[in-house]
């Protein structure tokens, strides 16, 4: 076996230190998870923790929300040094600027520089969590309709020193308390973020006192080289090729035709490089959909890692083998102030990531992935009102549904993927916990039959959710992508199901709801919605008959769809009829029936 | 005389506590197809050793306590009963949707199938709200027809989990009555009775697991009971439970979910007694190292912490158990863990294991991959001629060859350094496992004892302790059967829970006292049933609470009475302190939300002390052999048979202490003392820390 990488690694020391760094980031994540106040962090796991070198590159990360963390913390760590060249022990910085490395304004990041006794900056620890509120004009952290950052209204902290000598700058704390809804939640989350970063700092210092700072630097260098080697090796075994993939985000306020996107992709096994070019895309849009540099790159990088047939460590080393080309003032590039990037972690990021992994799939069987469904339908909406049980105001984002995951060459789509950028990490609300905390009743949460993205491997289905208020009026704010343009399948796989949303009035009348709305719900009314599903991978006629049989038995696929799309025929006992199936599949392979997405 | 039998994955352990309070440990292989065979076998072994018949041994016992992996194995191998699930209409996918979550970037695993398939899941029309009010009445006709359909499907057990049954159980109870009428003799579990816990997925999961185990565990326990009685046993049969207590075997048959961690949950019970009584330290990290797994638990200031987050298998890729248990986490690290070097040149140990078959290369059964055990052979820690008391001869050349070819050659190290590297990486992984548990449970390792149980504990316990900062390692006299001994040190106990959310800002003393009165009455009823009149008994009260808007509850004990604001303040202060201990932050100004109220009724059935351990009669002389330590090279090392050691004598490492079932390595600079009760106490050397710094 030939060794990959530059051969500089001390395989024993690196194994030990990798484990130690993982322990450090895990302790950060544990602190954050357990002490955060808002459900979006502590129940939904919408947070990230990592350690960066001073280059700056991502060295180690805990269980994190993928869209938060691959690219962004590194840019931010650079911004910290740019604005604060004189770093001191006890400093901590609050950062959420979408123009300088953050994901979107609702993600508050705390950066703590770790200095040695001589005052030399050695590492940066980073903790970030999605806030329940970030001061937006509307009570949502996803202001899709905001024409610019002013209309969005988020408080922006461009690398603001929030702690000096380990003590809070009370001025900044008061600003936040004065402008952020549910200020006690923000305060609790702030304490949790700072606590996590300080735990990371303390444990890094302990590690350095055991091994020495220089040894840690050596390790970081080796670890990057090792990871780059593995990544290069993985890419070197991919088929060579260039692909251009077109995709489109649904029509939204400010973009009535939707957002057409184009991704140019080059897989270069000889150069051990994957190049993604997002420059051939619209300028920044007059709405909150614009991506940030961090999310444009990260969405693409997640897709690349999803597409590889093997596991490669995720860090600054392996990232060197991915080049993402962006341009300034581009909706999927580097935003220019005052463009709004309020929805930068989901909307277009999902579409870009989906296009990249589908593009890679088109280069050869066994690699890439289909597209993952899009999100933010009303079951992920922000609910607000006055809770009749205690007379107090409430505002919270529900996380009562996930989009369906894309099929891979090997597995059916992950049912609870969240979306492309969440990568399955986010949790799904407990119905009882939602109902305890807010005056809502979730009447139904059920996987929809025949909503899978058909394929040799199926994209995950959509889920129908129905909910209403409990004895009060309630406002629901949402911005649902995936109702017009489905997640595409790959290599002959079919698209995932579309999202839809409607209101069931007290008298049973139905009102179709737009993809973006702020609506009022009366007692007895119900909002019903379906999440979008993931695309399939490969021709559904090649799905194993046993798998189709299981799907039908479990009510995931109807016998009719099994026949029409998968070419599988069942007898009265519900067993597949082998002869009839073989014949039908042969016939359908020549003349496929009309598909109904 | 009391007997304790722990049926583990590989061995069935028996500990006999005789009338004088002396312990003796016996081991025989587990017989998975019919586990009772292994039990009778080990009883036979003990009887023979004690010069009596099995009937005489069993007849002389006034209690037999049993722990088993039988139920967990059935779940992991999917050999449980065909079980139906009844849920609230609109929510048939509770078990499939779960609570979301996945290891980040792990795209290379299938989405797990639910415990009970959708085809056996039946919604009934009904709905209760969070306040307990009925939003939709139970459609009795529909429910009855569901019960009949379950019969048509030849269901062997039924789980019932309706939303908010924990605050208003009326609908679940009605469904229960219908199941009794329509499916007589088919066991079922009602979620609110089993575990009145908030969060429908967890409760449904626990209910499904419990129901699916009922036929199997009912048969198993009846069979065990009958065959023991046939063999001469005529006294009380108890089972250990996942919550670290004992219950009558009938209670476990009625709620078999109690048994799924019955063995591992006893390790911290034993660890606590040894740590407290031998080293006067009420905080401990307890490890149990076997051939394929490394179990870690904790004792925090005398109490054994719980968890509500136990996965049946791999986190996120298997169901959450949903039932509270002692926090014992099992890691795939053991003697059989395979060392390998990846194509980038990084050394890994595990997660693949050679298991017991083919086992390590040194076993000579066809294994060619180097394992942790092989590394220990190469380093001279394990004597190839004296493994398991000489019962098995190891092939040291095979170990050497495997370590050299798969690790040494690839890293440019000789066999000894390669073996030392394997131990170092393994030590690191075990230390990480300990740190996770310590962090999760707010235990400071530098103020705790590392209690090492299991046959493989002693090989690198000193290194693990040095790495996490534990100043002392304690290898109990009976370390090879830690769980079985723990059972003999455990109380009868049952947890009774009432879920009734209440904020301290709007605290209702009347309701709170009604709840406590109910808990007290139910606790007393349990104690009346279980305990004989002479024994010491009590009821401890806890609330499960969080700060308003936090969502993960923590347990806080509280004292009666709850009469006025001062009492509530005491409870609040206890919560803040506990929160601070766990998470290093508290918020004195914040409102608390109590979710549920718990009573633990307990009754002591043991002496409370550590008995003596019968020492083996076989005596061999100390010897010297060459062993290798990182940073020191090959050293002449004294090897002491355990029975040669005398109390109070200090032995400085390097040294090795052997017994037929364990090998304990005392690293250079570490100090070993045999305690009065026959355990090994090792002080972790300051030098080890210095070495680490020099590295």
Image (cartoon, coloured by chain):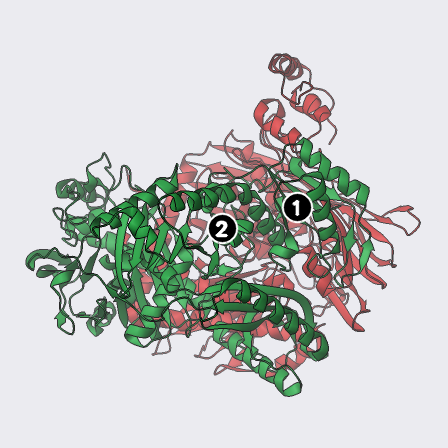
* Residue A481 visible in this rendered orientation of the protein: no
Q: Circle 2 is placed at which residue position?
A: B315
Q: Secondary structure at mark 2?
A: loop
Of A160 and B185, which appears nearest the observer?
Answer: B185
Q: Is residue B479 left or right of residue B605?
A: left
Chain that is red in the image: A
Of B131 and A24, which appears nearest the observer?
Answer: B131
Task: Kindly identify the residue that appears in the image at 50 percent across and 38 percent down.
Answer: B78
**Relative vertical location of residue A587 with respect to residue B518 in this rendering, above or below:** above
Task: Kindly identify the residue that appears in the image at 36 percent across and 71 percent down.
Answer: B608
Q: Residue furthest bottom?
A: B566
Location of residue B593 (image quadrant): bottom right
Q: Is residue B437 left or right of residue A451?
A: left
Q: Circle 1 is placed at which residue position?
A: A281
Q: Residue furthest right?
A: A507
Of A210 and B226, which appears nearest the observer?
Answer: B226
- The shade of chain B is green
Residue A397 image point, x, y percent: 71, 60
**Relative vertical location of residue B208 with respect to residue A193 in this rendering, above or below:** above
Q: Is residue B98 left or right of residue B339?
A: right
Placement of the N terminus of chain B among the 4 image quadrants? bottom left
Q: CA distance from mark 1 to mark 2?
A: 40 Å
């Amino acid at each position: 076996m030939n060794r990959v990488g530059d051969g500089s690694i001390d395989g024993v020391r690196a194994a030990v230190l990798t484990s130690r760094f993982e322990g450090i980031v895990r302790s950060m994540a544990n602190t954050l998870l357990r002490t955060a106040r808002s459900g979006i962090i502590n129940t939904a796991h919408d947070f990230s923790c990592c350690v960066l070198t001073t280059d700056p590159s991502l060295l180690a990360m805990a269980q994190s929300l993928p869209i938060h963390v691959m690219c962004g913390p590194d840019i931010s760590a650079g911004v910290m040094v740019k604005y604060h060249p004189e770093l001191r022990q006890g400093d901590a910085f609050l950062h959420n600027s979408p123009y300088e490395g953050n994901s979107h304004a609702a993600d508050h990041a705390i950066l703590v520089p770790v200095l040695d006794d001589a005052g030399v900056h050695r590492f940066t620890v980073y903790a970030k969590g999605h806030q329940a509120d970030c001061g937006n004009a509307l009570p949502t952290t996803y202001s899709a309709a905001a024409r610019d950052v002013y209309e969005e209204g988020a408080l922006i902290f461009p690398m603001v020193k929030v702690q000096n000598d380990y003590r809070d700058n009370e001025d900044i704390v008061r600003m936040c308390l004065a402008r952020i809804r549910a200020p006690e939640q923000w305060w609790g989350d702030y304490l949790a973020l700072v606590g996590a970063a300080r735990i990371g700092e303390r444990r890094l210092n302990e590690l350095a006192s055991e091994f020495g700072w220089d040894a840690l630097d050596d390790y970081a260098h080796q670890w990057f080289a090792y990871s780059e080697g593995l990544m290069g090796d993985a890419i070197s075994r991919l088929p060579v090729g260039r692909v251009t993939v077109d995709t489109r985000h649904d029509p939204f306020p400010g973009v009535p035709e939707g957002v057409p996107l184009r991704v140019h992709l080059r897989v270069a096994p000889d150069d051990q490089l994957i190049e993604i070019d997002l420059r051939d895309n619209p300028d920044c849009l007059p709405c909150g959909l614009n991506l940030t540099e961090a999310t444009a790159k990260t969405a693409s990088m997640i897709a690349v890692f999803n597409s590889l047939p093997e596991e490669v460590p995720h860090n600054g080393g392996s990232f060197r083998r991915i080049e993402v080309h962006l341009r300034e003032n581009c909706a999927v590039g580097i935003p220019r102030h005052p463009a709004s990037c309020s929805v930068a972690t989901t909307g277009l990021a999902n579409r870009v990531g989906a296009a990249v992994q589908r593009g890679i799939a088109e280069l050869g069987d066994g690699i890439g992935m289909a597209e993952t469904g899009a999100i933010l339908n009303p079951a992920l909406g922000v609910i607000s009102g006055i809770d009749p049980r205690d007379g107090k105001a409430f505002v919270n984002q529900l996380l009562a549904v996930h989009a369906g995951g894309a099929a891979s060459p090997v597995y059916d789509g992950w049912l609870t993927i969240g979306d492309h950028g969440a990568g399955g990490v986010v949790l799904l609300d407990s119905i009882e916990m939602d109902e305890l905390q807010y005056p809502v009743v979730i009447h139904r949460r059920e996987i929809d039959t025949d909503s899978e993205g058909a394929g040799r491997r199926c994209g995950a289905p959509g889920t129908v959710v129905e909910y209403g208020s409990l004895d009060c009026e309630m406002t629901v704010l949402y911005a649902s992508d995936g109702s017009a343009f489905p997640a595409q399948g790959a290599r002959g796989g079919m698209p995932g199901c579309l999202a839809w949303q409607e209101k069931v009035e007290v008298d049973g009348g139905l009102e179709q709801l737009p993809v973006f709305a702020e609506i009022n719900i009366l007692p007895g009314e119900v909002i019903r919605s379906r999440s979008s599903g993931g695309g399939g991978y490969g021709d559904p006629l090649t799905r194993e008959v046993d798998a189709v049989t299981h799907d039908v038995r479990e009510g995931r696929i109807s016998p009719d769809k099994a026949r029409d799309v998968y070419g599988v025929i069942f007898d009265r006992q519900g067993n597949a009829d082998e002869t009839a199936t073989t014949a039908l599949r042969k016939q359908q392979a020549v003349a496929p029936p009309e598909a109904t997405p | 005389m009391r007997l304790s039998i722990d049926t583990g994955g590989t061995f069935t352990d028996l500990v006999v506590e005789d009338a004088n309070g002396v312990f003796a440990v016996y081991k025989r292989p587990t017989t998975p197809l019919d586990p009772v065979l292994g039990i009778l076998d080990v009883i036979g072994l003990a009887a023979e050793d004690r010069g009596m018949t099995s009937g005489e041994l069993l007849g002389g016992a006034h209690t037999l306590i049993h722990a088993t992996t039988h139920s967990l194995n059935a779940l992991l191998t999917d050999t449980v009963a065909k079980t139906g699930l009844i849920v609230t209409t609109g929510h048939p996918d509770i078990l499939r949707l779960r609570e979301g979550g996945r290891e980040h970037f792990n795209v290379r695993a299938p989405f797990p199938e639910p415990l009970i398939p959708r085809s056996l899941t039946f919604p009934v029309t009904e709905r209760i709200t969070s306040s307990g009010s009925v939003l939709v009445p139970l459609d009795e006709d529909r429910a009855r027809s569901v019960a009949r359909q379950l019969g048509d499907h030849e269901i062997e057990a039924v789980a019932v989990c309706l939303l908010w049954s924990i605050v208003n159980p009326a609908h679940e109870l009605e469904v229960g009555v219908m199941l009794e009428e329509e499916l007589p003799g088919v066991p079922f579990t009602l979620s609110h009775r089993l575990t009145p816990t908030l969060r429908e997925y967890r409760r449904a999961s626990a209910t499904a697991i419990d129901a699916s185990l009922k036929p199997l565990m009912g048969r198993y326990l009846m069979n065990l009971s009958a065959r023991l009685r046939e063999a001469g046993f005529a006294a009380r049969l108890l089972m250990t439970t996942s919550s670290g207590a004992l219950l009558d075997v009938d209670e476990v048959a009625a709620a078999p979910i109690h048994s799924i961690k019955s063995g591992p949950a006893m390790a911290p019970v034993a660890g606590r007694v040894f740590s407290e009584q031998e080293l006067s330290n009420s905080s401990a990290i307890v490890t149990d190292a076997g051939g394929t797994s490394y179990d870690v638990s904790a004792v925090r200031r005398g109490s054994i912490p719980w968890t509500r987050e136990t996965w049946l298998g791999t986190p996120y890729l298997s169901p959450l158990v949903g039932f509270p248990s002692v926090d014992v986490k099992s890691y795939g690290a053991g003697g059989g863990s395979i060392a390998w070097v990846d194509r980038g040149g990084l050394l890994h140990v595990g997660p693949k294991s050679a298991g017991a078959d083919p086992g390590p290369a040194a076993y000579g059964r066809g294994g060619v991959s180097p394992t942790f055990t092989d590394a220990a052979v190469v380093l001279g820690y394990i004597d190839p001629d004296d493994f398991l008391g000489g019962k098995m001869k190891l092939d040291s050349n095979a170990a050497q060859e495997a370590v050299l070819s798969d690790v040494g050659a690839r890293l440019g190290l000789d066999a000894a350094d390669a073996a030392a590297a394997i131990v170092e990486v393994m030590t690191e992984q075990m230390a990480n496992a300990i740190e996770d548990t310590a962090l999760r449970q707010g235990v400071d390792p530098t103020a705790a004892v590392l209690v090492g149980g299991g046959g493989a504990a002693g090989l690198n316990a000193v290194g693990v302790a040095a790495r996490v900062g534990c100043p002392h390692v304690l290898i109990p006299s009976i370390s090879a059967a830690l769980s079985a001994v723990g059972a003999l040190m455990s109380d009868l106990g049952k947890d009774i829970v009432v879920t009734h959310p209440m904020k301290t800002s709007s605290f209702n003393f009347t309701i709170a006292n009604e709840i406590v009165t109910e808990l007290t009455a139910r606790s007393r009823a349990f104690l009346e049933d279980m305990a004989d009149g002479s024994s010491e008994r009590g009821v401890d009260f806890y609330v499960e609470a969080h700060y308003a808007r936090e969502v993960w509850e923590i347990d806080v004990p509280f004292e009666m009475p709850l009469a006025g604001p001062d009492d509530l303040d005491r409870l609040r202060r206890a919560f803040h302190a506990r929160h601070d201990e766990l998470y290093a932050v508290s918020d004195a100004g914040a409102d608390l939300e109590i979710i549920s109220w718990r009573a633990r009724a307990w009754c002591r059935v043991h002496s409370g002390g550590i008995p003596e351990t019968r020492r083996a009669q076989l005596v061999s002389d100390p010897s010297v052999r060459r062993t290798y330590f990182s940073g020191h090279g090959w050293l002449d090392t004294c090897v002491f048979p355990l029975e040669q050691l005398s109390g109070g004598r200090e032995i400085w490492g390097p040294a090795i202490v052997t017994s037929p079932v364990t090998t304990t390595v005392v690293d250079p600079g570490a100090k070993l003392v045999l305690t009065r009760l026959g355990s090994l106490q090792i002080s972790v050397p300051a030098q080890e820390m210095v070495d680490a710094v020099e590295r």
